[in-house]
Amino acid sequence: EPDVPPIVLTDEYIEEVESSMPLLPSEYRSELTRIGLDRAVIEDIIAVPSTAQAVMEVLKSSNAEHAKRAAFWLMQPQSDDNTDADTAIEISPAQLVKLSEMVSDSKLSSTAAKDVLAEMMKTGDDPESIAEKKNLIQVSDEGALDAIVAEVLAENEKAANDVKAGEMKAIGFLVGQVMAKSKGKANPALAQQLIKKHLGV
């Protein structure tokens, strides 16, 4: 037999091969449990390898908050008969992180984010451009929202007085009126804060 020289594998090559290997289900479970996902959700994610990989890539490139949000987003369309689950992998981790950041920054509501995601799955477009095109960017400008709150309180004196009297259930109605006047674009948390400020509660 001819002499075969020993094969020397560099550390860099070994590291590259290891990083390209998919995680084992037990490793996925460990990482997804760490970010606070329920066991049933984790098993659903692991059942779709492309989804599990996408969630892990989001986690590696950002943080647990964005990964957890991405996990729920990617699992949701799979129960929709009109959406092919495999299209979810066409959205890059960077796009998912950007969409999640828009929710964290109060630029999008959770409901609006789902609408943006559905459009991203169809077009692959940037989440911010989709949100702007669909007029879904949340109003978080205190000055603009304050004027709407003042108008709502003037038109709904009974509900305003109920809140002043300690009936906090009425504040939900008032927030709903603000949302209606803003065509769903108001930041509900800020709207509630401004209502309380106006009413001194």
Image (cartoon, helix red, strand yellow):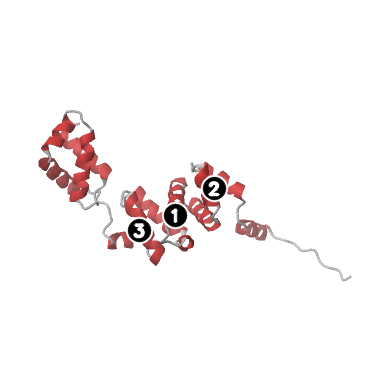
Image: 166 above or below 52? above
Q: Amino acid at mark 2?
A: Glu
Depth check, mark 2 against mark 3: the one in front is 2
- Residue 152 is labelled as none
Residue 25 at x, y = what percent?
60, 49
Q: Amino acid at mark 3?
A: Val
Q: Residue furthest right?
A: 1
Q: Residue 79: give its label.
A: 1
Residue placed at 44% from the left, 50% from the top? 72
- Residue 61: where, in percent of width, then height? 48, 53
Question: Residue pushed farthest bottom?
Answer: 2
- Provide the residue designation for mark 2: 43
* Residue 76: % across, % down: 43, 53
- Which residue is rendered at x = 16% and y = 43% of the image? 149
Mark 3 burial class by Cα count in 10 Å: few <14, some 14-19, many 20+: many
Instruction: Tell me the distance, in whole angstroms, between the alpha carbons under discs 1 and 3.
Output: 17 Å
